[in-house]
Image (cartoon, rainbow, N blue to C red):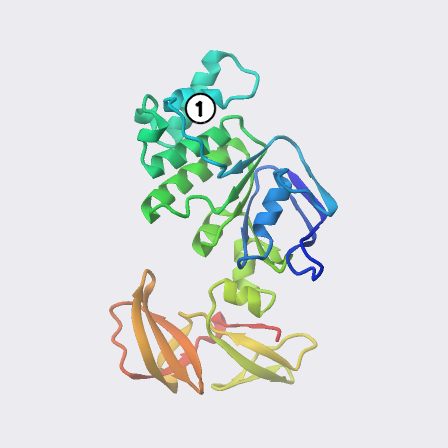
Amino acid sequence: MIRVNNLSKQFDSRGIAGLHALNFTLNKGIVMGIMGPNGSGKTTLLKILSGQLNSDQGNFETDGSVSLFPTHEILTDMNVQKFLISKVTIDVDDEKKIQLARDLADTFEFTFQLRQNLFQLSSGQRQKVLLAAELINRPALLLMDEPFTHLDPFTRRDILNGLFQFIRQQGITVLWVTHELEEALKYSDIVGLMNFGRLEQLGTPLSLLRNPRNLFVAQFMGYQNFIPVKFEQGVAETPWGKWNASLANASEGIMVIPDNAWKMNEGLEAQIEESYGTRQGIEHRLRFDGRQLVLKTMPTVDVQEKVKIMPIWEECFLIPL
């Protein structure tokens, strides 16, 4: 569990960098992904929570020990098992220390490396061992600042799968900073999106995807198609005609069209400027009414230079200007 109360940190007189009155509570075992642009305060938050930096105002409470990963890597001539045993600080006998090391080796699949020295390991194996060293004392709160960014996607996915399975089993509360949207949505219970030292929006991954609070959140959630609209008597005026949608107490808004929420071969004509492959299919960049739009199709769909497009109304939504 962690409770953050009005946490603030200022680095200069302008008051832009740092943190500004952060408040949130995570119950035991909850995983919170922290996202945001560079300089938005993510690492500052972790440094305060780990005791590396003092806040100017506010406080936080936890219900146990706090561990930060990654930490400065120190290579020794110890083998992996001795290194892990040396990291045990909880009050257990030597046999239990050995068992803790072997259990984590089994969890993160480096059992066959227990007798190897740290410097003999690959980068991916070494990261697994260093992570195990942070977990061996079963911290109540685990802080992670962009872990495993330098690893290849397969090794990274392998480590993350094992890590979050272990975290769920042990009931460890986690705050982790990541720039990978797919990972944040997959592994987090709660996502906090930061901007200029403030929490722009905090909620479940689905709530941020389905109900982004503003344009900044929508863009960070990966949406790319934004059409300004005006409302009249509860109806939005769009380039494709009237849409039965509106925002409370607003005369204008922004229509958000997900990349795959298009009907083809009906509606209005757009010019394809660029097409390229992605993991989700083929992404097409279109020129429409003086702005760029994005449309995704399956690889088997044949798309010509010009195409007629129409939004799938049920999959679109509105955000405030």
- Judging depth in this view, the residue of 308 and 4 nearest the camera is 4
Q: Reply above or below: 316 against 193.
A: below
Relative image position of residue 277 (x, y in whole percent)? 29, 66
The N terminus lies in which quarter of the figure?
top right
Q: Quadrant of residue 109?
A: top left
The C terminus lies in which quarter of the figure?
bottom right
Q: Reply above or below: 219 against 252.
A: above
Relative image position of residue 225 (x, y in whole percent)? 47, 74
Q: Reply above or below: 139 against 214.
A: above
Graded by Cα atoms within 10 Å as few (under 14), some (14 to 19) or many (20 or more), the crowding at tag 1 reads: many
Residue sitting at the far front:
13
- Judging depth in this view, the residue of 186 and 128 nearest the camera is 128
Relative image position of residue 11 (x, y in whole percent)? 67, 53
Give the amino acid at mark 1.
Leu
Q: How many marks?
A: 1
Q: Residue at x 33, y 47 (%)?
A: 152
Q: Residue at x 27, y 78 (%)?
A: 303
- Say left or right for 296 vs 199: left
Q: Residue at x 30, y 73 (%)?
A: 275
Relative image position of residue 272 (x, y in whole percent)? 33, 81
Q: Secondary structure at mark 1?
A: helix
- Judging depth in this view, the residue of 122 and 267 nearest the camera is 122
Return the residue at label 1.
84
Q: Quadrant of residue 269?
A: bottom left
